Image (cartoon, rainbow, N blue to C red):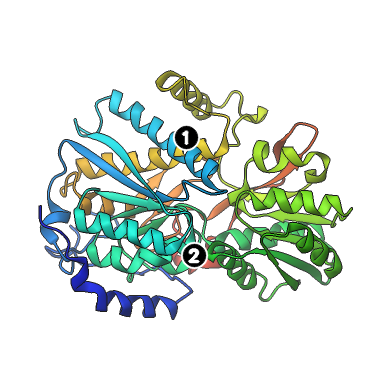
Amino acid sequence: MKARHLGLISVAAAAAVTLAACSSGGSASTSASSASSGSAAASEPAGFYTMNTSNCANPAQVTKKITGTLTLGWSGPFSGPIAPFADAVIQGAKDRFAVQNAAGGIDGVKLAIATKDDQFNPAMTKTNVDSWIQSNSVQAFDVFGSGPLAAVAADQNLACLPELLASATDDTYRNIAKYPWTTEFLPSNNVEEAAEVKVIQAQFPNASKITVAIAEDQTGSGQSYLDGMENAVKGTNVVIKKIVPFGTDPGAAAISLQQANADVVFGALVVPECLQMTEAMAKIGYSPKLTVQASNCGSASLMFAPAGAAANGQKLVFWEKDPGNPIYKNDPGYNAYVTDAMKVDPAHALPTDTYYETGWMIADMDINAFQVAAKSSLGLSEVGIMQAARNQDYQPPLFINGIKWIMNANEAYGITKLQPLVYKASTKSFAYDGSIIDTCSAVLAAADCTGGL
């Protein structure tokens, strides 16, 4: 099996990293790229994105038909404090793949997941992904976190190994022209924080100025959330008053947040820090007028309920149907998910766990791309999968109704609409807090906000 020759592209990779560092805006390409065999067919809709394999290290690898088994690699923190959440995501994804395999896979091709531990360390993520690039042992892969994604995106794009739905928020890698082989699952930091600023303003409708203190996780993910908030407040009446590092001493961070005496506390955090922040603030008797949490902490049962009354009234924006929430008891998509999960894997399924549900959802979206690829002229190949992933207009069953997953040449954001939620301690679940917020025009030119192909 011919390898992708990672070592031959190291100089080019370094150049790509430098370019990426100079472009944090992540604007999408505004026109379809050229395919290796020419432009997209005239029958393709306007805005269709066509992959190009001419610069791939091994074009034959990325264009050949996948047979037997399609393996998705997943590098993540499978040891350390985040491991339980990452493990739940993988279990959900494996179970969704199992449902598809029981139905015949993708035209007879079975689906599998191969994991590698990276301890949320970008250097280890790079080692893991480099090994997949060199061995050709996976046909696509995924990672957790903006830092790990930053460590691998340049080499991965030069090798043309599809990165499908990274659990990351950094807009840098939504630039289609520079990173055509990368998609991100989590809402863009700019999309999410634009919606959160709207939530903050709605809480203080008559204020001339609203101050915010930010608790920042000390990784690339925290920096990404901070960057998004700094962009989102520009030109508004929301002002960042203080940024507090959040790490090994939540108590000290809580005291610093209290001393800021801001109207709002925003947690630019990762699991399990959002719960730690709430508990630390409660311990010192600090209750800000409003607390807003990042969406990756969007589990009512795991990140809010353990804090009891201290979490009551905290807000976030989200796109996923909160598992176990009574408002979804009659929802067809949610109920089908629970039924399928318990049927396929009754010993390990965790359908009421948000992170398990997220893994199931990501796998479901991957399967949709695989199915589209198999029916396309490119077939079930790495380039076929990536082109299908780049052109999506899909309503995942576990997305909140009214929020779709959209990808095309002009929209590389996937999610541009988010539902404001408020945590209710009395029900231990989220309630809708106003209408869905559409942020597309805040991150893209209005002409590019087409709502699909």
- 324 to the left or right of 391: right
- 405 to the left or right of 259: left
Q: Position of residue 52 (x, y in %)?
A: 20, 64
Q: Nearer the viewer, residue 4 or 181?
A: 4
Asked if residue 353 is positioned above or below residue 272 in the image, the reply reads above
Within-10-Å neighbours for mark 1: few <14, some 14–19, many 20+: many
Can residue 43 be seen in this snapshot? Answer: no
- 71 to the left or right of 338: left
Q: Nearer the viewer, residue 100 or 421?
A: 100
Ranked by sequence position, the earlier of labels 1 and 2 is 2
- 382 to the left or right of 29: left
Q: Nearer the viewer, residue 40 or 4?
A: 4
Mark 1 in CB contact with mark 2 (< 8 angstroms): no
In the drawing, what numbered circle is on residue 91?
A: none
Q: Disc 1 on helix, strand or loop?
A: loop
In the drawing, what numbered circle is on residue 170?
A: 2
- Label 1, label 2: how far apart the Cα atoms are: 25 Å
Can residue 8 be seen in this snapshot? Answer: yes
Which residue lies most toward the right here? 285
Q: Position of residue 328 (x, y in %)?
A: 61, 29
Question: In the image, what residue occupies the spot 67% across and 59% down?
Answer: 248
Q: Position of residue 286 (x, y in %)?
A: 87, 56
Q: Give the residue type at disc 1.
A: Pro
Question: In the image, what residue occupies the spot 58% across and 30% down?
Answer: 352
Identify the residue under disc 1: 397
